Image (tube, rainbow, N blue to C red):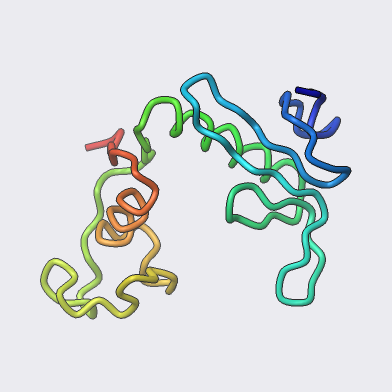
Amino acid sequence: MVEMYVSDSLYLNAEVLDEKHWMIHLSNGAEIPVEKDPEHYGSRWGWKIGNQIFSDDKTALRYLERLVTEKLTGKRIVLHAKGEVPEICGVNGAACRAPGECNRALCSRCPVAEKFFADRDGVELVYAVD
């Protein structure tokens, strides 16, 4: 396997697939695909890590570090207290405005959305603050 740094800005050893694609192999067998300069809906972006798109190196690196931690530990640590479901979304999210998507402004810090994404990504959701 040929290994090199993904780039000078991401500093993580990865298998080189081609000049713009790498695969990070974690010690537990999990893998993270990385792409430089991906096109998404007709626009060019800085990075694609997994299925997330980023415009700048700093944000991409923060996400990558968090993703590595989650894939190794199986836990997503949320750095705020568990919030309330927005009233407009009904009791316990029964009338959720974006079921299966959770991509509205109301979904920010919504415990229904946080659980949806944790379940989708196969990680345990841990609230660090009471």
Relative to 31, residue 101 above or below: below
Tell me which residue sits at (74%, 51%) in the image. 47
125, 81: nearer the viewer:
125
The C terminus lies in which quarter of the figure?
top left
* Residue 115 appears left or right of 30: left
Relative to 104, residue 9 above or below: above
What is the total number of numbered labels drawn onto the structure image?
A: 0
Whole-percent x and y of residue 95? 19, 80
Whole-percent x and y of residue 11? 76, 26
Image quadrant where residue 120 sits: bottom left
Whole-percent x and y of residue 93? 19, 70
Q: Residue furthest top?
A: 27
Q: Residue furthest front?
A: 1
* Residue 70 appears left or right of 88: right
* Residue 92 appears left or right of 37: left
Tell me which residue sits at (64%, 47%) in the image. 49
The N terminus lies in which quarter of the figure?
top right
17, 64: nearer the viewer:
17
Whole-percent x and y of residue 7? 83, 34
